[in-house]
Amino acid sequence: MEEVDRILIHSLRQTGTEIGDDVDSVKQFSSELIVEAVVRCLRVIDPPLGNGLSPSLPPGMSARFRLGMSLAQACQDLGYKGEIGYQTFLYSSEPEIRSLLMFLVEKLPRASAEASDQPAGKSALLQKAIAAQIRAQLALPWVPPTCRLPLLCQTQSAGVSASFRSQALLLLVAWGLWSVCSVLVREVADYCRDFLPPVTAQPSQHASVPASLLERHALDLSAAQEWENEWNSQGLLTRLSPEAYRSRKRARLQKRVEEQLRPPPSRARARAPPRSGPDLAELLQSIGGRAPGERPGQGHALHPHREVHLHTGTLIILLTFVQEPEASSQQMAVASAMPSSRQSEEDLLAQQQDEMQALQQQLQQLSVRMEEVGGDMKQLSVSITQVSDELKQRELSNSEKECSVRVKKQTIDLLPDAENNLAKLQTLVESSAKRVVSLASQWEKHRAPLIEERRRLKELCSNRELESSRKLSEIKDLHDKIRQSADEAKKKEGLYKQLITEFENLPKDVSRSAYTQRILEIVGNIRKQKEEITKILSDTKDLQKEINSLTGKLDRTFAVTDELVFKDAKKDESVRKSYKYLAALHENCTQLIQTIEDTGTIMREIRDLEEQIETENGKKTVSNLEKILEDYKAIRQENSALATKIREA
Amino acid sequence: MELSEFVQKGLQYLADADYFDVKTFSALVEVAFRSLLASHADEAILDGAEFKHIDQTLLKHCHVAATTCILELAKQNSDKSTICTCLEDIKFDPERIDIFYSSFQKNKSELENLLSSIGRCPPHICDASWRLDYQIKNSHVHKVNQPAYLITLNVENGGARPSEEVHFSCTMEQLQDLVGKMKDAAKSLDKATQM
């Protein structure tokens, strides 16, 4: 029992119960201590249940009674099977309390044991580190600022702090910029070598150096990670080298950006006032229909194109071309206006208006002229194409005619020796036909192996393709595996480190081996006891068997004797007497046996009763009864006090 | 610990005996620490005589790598084994690791101060005084009869500046609320230590 009590007290101390050092068995527990221990256990096992109960006994008797009742209820809710009520706590008996406490301690969650199997996450480790740091700082006493040592200054003064402000750093352009501005490579390299300040001198404020460096590094890391992800998910499938993939992606992006920026109608529409519909002609009408001075703010940029009724392309070109000079002229106007700020504003405005009108007129003239010239050019180009077409046709007909003339000339030459020449021609035709046939057969001869070769190569190609896709998927699998194993290794390493630190932090005084040895001893004892019990059981069985056989023998012997004697008894008087004696003897013996058995049962009962008496004695009945009496009196007093209060009120 | 490719490359140059002999290496490590911990920026920090024979571009690259690596190591509160494995991965020989580690150890507390000075910190309260006033009446109400606490908190704000004071007045309930909140804060701090 001492062992059990020690374990109980140890685990109760862990739950936060304050048990004095002199208490080393459950017998010494007072009611207050019991209540506190039970409440603390309940709080650990089931926080919402336990938080409603106070760990200290209240002074009022009725309140104590209520607390006992609710504690008993809570224990029963947890599944305690034994007898329990308010009396368990207020008028305790040692075995009851021990069994209750054992139940509660078994119910305590073993979170720590289970948690150590899993590697704690980064956040848990960080929180632990933070907790350790706070503990260390709390352990230090606070010292007024004037008497602080430099060591304390770190933790106790607010320190001069600057917020996390980072600036973009220009790292060496060797990284990544080479490819972008290949034209400028040499100049950039020269700049890097001779003029680029070291990275710690780049930020305008020296305090933002660490922040900038850290941010830059995090940026690089995340970009690398992003690229890795993309490459593994999409890039590998394209079967391009990383550089090719990158350049293709860049081209694609550029194209998309251009597509987004290109569409002229949307741009024109964006610039146009909202009332203009999608119809371009209407839009142009609306632009052209506005008077110059009507809306100086909105129509400003569009005034030069009032006369423009051309198609969209021209409009856009004009827009882009015209805006720039206009903007620059505006800037110039502003620049010239700056020094002469003394002039009145109206003068300035008028001047600007004049200038603008002059410019607009000039522009109109120019555009009209351009239009005219464009029309002329178009006409001229049309006529040029017509003329060149004619020329080509003429040339064609010319060459045809030349051909026919040549043929006719040859035939005329051949005419004089017609017979001979005809035969010659026929042989010529035949030989050429033969040649064609032989060439065709040769061609066939060559063709067949070539086609065969082509087919073979095609097959080979497709095989290779299959192989490569298979390998690609294998590579992907391998990548995944590598990543998984790396993750696992990292996790395991973390777990190992954590376990080592935990192991180092563990209290060394709990001797595990002693416990296990004791447990083994106890198990050995139990085994020995079991053996003894089985021995005794077999002995008892043997005895029972012997008794049974003896009883049977007796019964049989008696029956035989009885029969023999009964037979003789009819003839002889003395034998009859002896038969009577026999019967009496048998009866007496049975009685004797009965008595012995009765004695045995009574002895057993006596032993049971003795045990019961012992347990009753263990329950401290007398002192508990006295306590109950006192409490009863207290309750009566309280009741009477309450009654008088009611009466007074 | 993860380092970006750029930093790794720079550190590899540093580890390479063809580019940096041990003397130059230790000088560069020293310069890296100095440039981080110095109170003002110095553009000429890499113009020392010991670096004359090295290409300036390479030197700047290595300087960036060294400073970033130092900051990351300090940020993660790395112990000796982590630093060693990290540098061994980049092929540092034991001698250079020793040089690097000893200067890191020497400057560690200053680096920690540097990193912890980034951020905001509310002012510390170091003293408080109070006065209890009893308001009898004012221009609007004839009979007020309410107590009011005038609290002055002495606040320590940064080592350099003189201490400031925060004044406010509050009623009894507000003061109780404040005290309760402070007690809660202390309790949660206690709870945080029992992780």
Image (cartoon, rainbow, N blue to C red):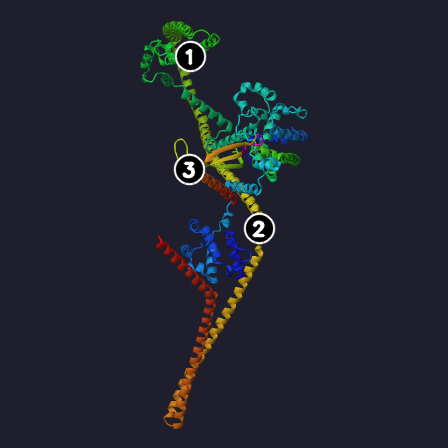
Label at residue B145:
3
Could you tell me which residue is drawn at 55 percent across and 56 percent down?
Answer: A21
Q: Nearer the viewer, mark 2 or mark 3?
A: 3
Name above or below for residue A398 compared with residue A266.
above
Question: Mark 2 or 1 closer to N-term?
Answer: 1
What residue type is disc 3 on? Asn
Find out whether the residues at labels 2 and 3 contact each other: C-beta distance under 8 Å: no
Which residue appears at 49% of the width and 58% of the height?
A30
For the residue carrying disc 3, how many other residues have a C-alpha within 10 Å: few (<14), some (14-19), or many (20+)? few
Residue B175's tag is none
Label 1 residue SS: helix
> Which of the 4 quarters of the picture holds residue A597?
bottom left
* Residue type pointed to by label 2: Pro
Q: Is residue B111 left or right of residue A236?
A: right
Q: Is residue A313 above or below residue A550?
A: above
Kindly identify the amino acid type of the residue bearing the numbered disc 1: Gln
Instruction: Give the number of the mark in front: 2 or 1.
Output: 2
Determine whether, in the image, residue A29 is placed left or right of residue A147. Answer: left
Of A356 and B192, the residue lying toward us: B192
Dot 2 falls on a residue whose secondary structure is: loop
